[in-house]
Amino acid sequence: MKEIQQRIAASFDKQGLMETLGAKLALVADGEVHIALPFSKHLSQQHGFVHAGAIASIVDSACAYAALTKASQDYEVVAVEFKINFLRPALGERFLAVGKVQNAGRTLTVSTGEVRAFTDEGPSYKVVALMQTTVANVRRDASSATTRPAG
């Protein structure tokens, strides 16, 4: 398990978006990954809630990394599709995206996720978003191929 935790931590550290958002890897377990996000005015939309794009990004990453815990060592994962439902405004001092594998296949993995909003008033939370995602397992050498526009 320690090897998987290190692999996911190294991959997470390469994600510029997670760094930009201020998100941190909080937990890596077999089939489950948590990503923490503190509230920031810089992530808010016009009403003061955390923007849906930031919420979707952390739960998408949590679900994908949960899938990666089940993938073979020579594979990476990439999102094929996801659906997200926003249940209430993303209000809180901190947020936690929880991704869990529901079914891990040879080529596709289905994960579900939720984003929890916490306030400083206690340990309870409110779920602000739910996600279901499908990711594809791709060979590491194929996933690292990059194409650049000519010019």
Image (tube, rainbow, N blue to C red):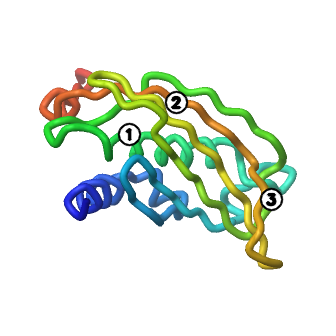
- Distance, label 3 to label 2, CA atoms, is 24 Å
Task: Determine the residue located farthest toward the right in the rendered image.
Answer: 47
Q: Position of residue 47 (x, y in %)?
A: 87, 51
Q: Residue at x 20, y 35 (%)?
A: 75
Element marked by disc 1: helix
Q: Position of residue 111 (x, y in %)?
A: 49, 35
Q: Using the image, determine if residue 129 lies above or below residue 109.
A: below
Label 1: how many Cα within 10 Å (few below 14, some 14–19, many 20+): many
Q: Using the image, determine if residue 72 lies above or below residue 116.
A: above
Provide the residue designation for mark 1.
67
Q: Nearer the viewer, residue 139 or 113?
A: 113
| Tag 3–tag 2 contact (CB < 8 Å) | no
Looking at the rendered structure, the kind of residue marked 2 is Thr
Residue 135 vs residue 39: left or right?
Answer: left
Earlier in the chain: of badge 3 and badge 2, it is: 3
| Tag 1–tag 2 contact (CB < 8 Å) | yes
Residue 103 shows which numbered tag? none
Label 2: how many Cα within 10 Å (few below 14, some 14–19, many 20+): many
Looking at the rendered structure, the kind of residue marked 1 is Ala
Q: Position of residue 25 (x, y in %)?
A: 44, 63
Q: Residue at x 69, y 66 (%)?
A: 39
Residue 91 shows which numbered tag? 3
Can you tell which quarter of the image residue 29 is in? bottom left
Provide the residue designation for mark 2.
133
Label 3: how many Cα within 10 Å (few below 14, some 14–19, many 20+): some
Looking at the rendered structure, the kind of residue marked 3 is Leu
Q: Nearer the viewer, residue 45 or 12?
A: 12
Can you tell which quarter of the image residue 105 is in? top left
Q: Using the image, determine if residue 23 lies above or below residue 74.
A: below
